[in-house]
Image: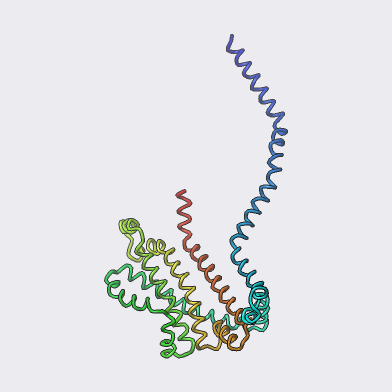
């Protein structure tokens, strides 16, 4: 007799609880969501403010430098040096004039053509040779002394040699760029191949992969981050060496623009050319970083799956 009573009491309690939840549910949900709705706005605002603050802090050094460049020549530098260090707005005006009359585009196109040609030749040759040298120890012992000699010889020191042998045309400039970009890619390719996990190589060989498949499936993907480090270094070197080469003997290019403006006492144009070189180097670096992320996507995918 006690069991039905207990069941009845339980049903009554469940029903009352269910009734309270059904009756008070919308009010309770509204009361719960009301504070959240009030917090959502400030939270978004704080998040946006935090993101903007980080962006400003990250660019703070550059903004401070630009501000110093704008105000320093006028208020800090002596009057005798203002001619040789114009404010930033004067340089930007000169840059705009060079863009309007098309001079900057012509010089930029000439420099990009030479730099891209030499850089492409260097990357293809250095990656191919680096893979062979890292894989075949006998070839490494044979070529390493010669590679060490040329690696420790500055590219600009050989600029007169390239000019005498190849002339002052495009061939000498592309060759000096290829020489300067070759060794960073070569050394990083060798280091990248030699640091591949030996367990991966043994596992691939146990699965019956051929040498070509081993390079394609294991060696190259594992060495990509190190190779791209060398490629980024080579990209910077190719631009810097080309600018120096164009200052010696050229009729077009950013290096020619800088030295010709200096000799013609067009100081704002000279600084405009230097600023263009800096922006070009920054853009090249960002593009190479994006390419590295593209070719290293498999690492991110594996890491996310492991997590």
Colouring convention used in this rendered image of the protein: rainbow
**Which residue is rendered at x = 60% and y = 14% of the image?**
6
**Which residue is rendered at x = 70% and y = 33% of the image?**
28
- Describe residue 107's horizontal placement relative to residue 36 as left or right: left
Residue 192 to residue 242: above or below: above
Q: Position of residue 76 (x, y in %)?
A: 64, 73
Q: Position of residue 120 (x, y in %)?
A: 46, 76
Q: Nearer the viewer, residue 221 or 66?
A: 66
Residue 12 to residue 36: above or below: above
Q: Nearer the viewer, residue 266 or 29?
A: 266
Q: Position of residue 296 (x, y in %)?
A: 47, 61
Q: Position of residue 131 (x, y in %)?
A: 36, 69
**Total numbered labels:** 0
Residue 54 to residue 157: above or below: above
**Which residue is rendered at x = 62% and y = 60% of the image?**
56
- Describe residue 85's horizontal placement relative to residue 118 as left or right: right
Residue 261 is drawn in which quadrant?
bottom right
Tell me the quarter of the image containing the N terminus: top right
**Which residue is rendered at x = 50% and y = 87% of the image?**
248
Residue 156 is drawn in which quadrant?
bottom left
């Amino acid at each position: 007799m006690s069991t039905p009573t207990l069941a009845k009491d339980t049903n009554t309690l469940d029903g009352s609880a269910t009734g309270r939840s059904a009756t008070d549910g919308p009010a309770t949900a509204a009361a719960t969501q009301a504070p959240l709705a009030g917090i959502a706005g400030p939270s978004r605002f704080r998040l946006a403010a935090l993101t903007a603050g980080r962006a400003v802090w990250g660019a703070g050094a550059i903004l401070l430098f630009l501000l110093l460049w704008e105000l320093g020549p006028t208020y800090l530098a002596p009057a005798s040096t203002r001619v040789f260090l114009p404010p930033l707005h004067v340089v930007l005006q000169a840059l705009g004039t060079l863009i309007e009359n098309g001079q900057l585009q012509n010089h930029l196109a000439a420099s990009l053509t030479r730099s891209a040609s030499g850089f492409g030749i260097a990357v293809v040759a250095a990656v191919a040779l680096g893979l062979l040298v890292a894989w075949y120890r006998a070839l490494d012992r044979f070529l390493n002394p010669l590679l060490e000699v040329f690696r420790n010889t500055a590219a600009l020191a050989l600029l007169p040699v390239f000019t005498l042998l190849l002339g002052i045309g495009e061939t000498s400039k592309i060759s000096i760029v290829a020489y300067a970009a070759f060794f960073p890619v070569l050394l990083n390719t060798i280091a990248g191949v030699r640091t591949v996990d030996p367990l991966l190589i043994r596992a691939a060989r146990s699965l019956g992969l051929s040498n070509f498949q081993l390079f394609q499936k294991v060696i190259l993907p594992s060495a990509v981050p190190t190779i791209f480090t060398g490629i980024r270094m080579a990209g910077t070197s190719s631009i810097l060496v080309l600018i120096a080469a164009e200052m010696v003997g050229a009729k077009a290019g950013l290096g020619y623009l800088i030295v010709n403006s200096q000799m013609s006492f067009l100081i704002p144009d000279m600084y405009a050319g230097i600023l263009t070189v800096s922006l070009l180097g920054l853009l090249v670096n960002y593009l190479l970083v994006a390419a590295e992320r593209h070719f290293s996507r498999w690492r991110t995918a594996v890491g996310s799956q492991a997590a």
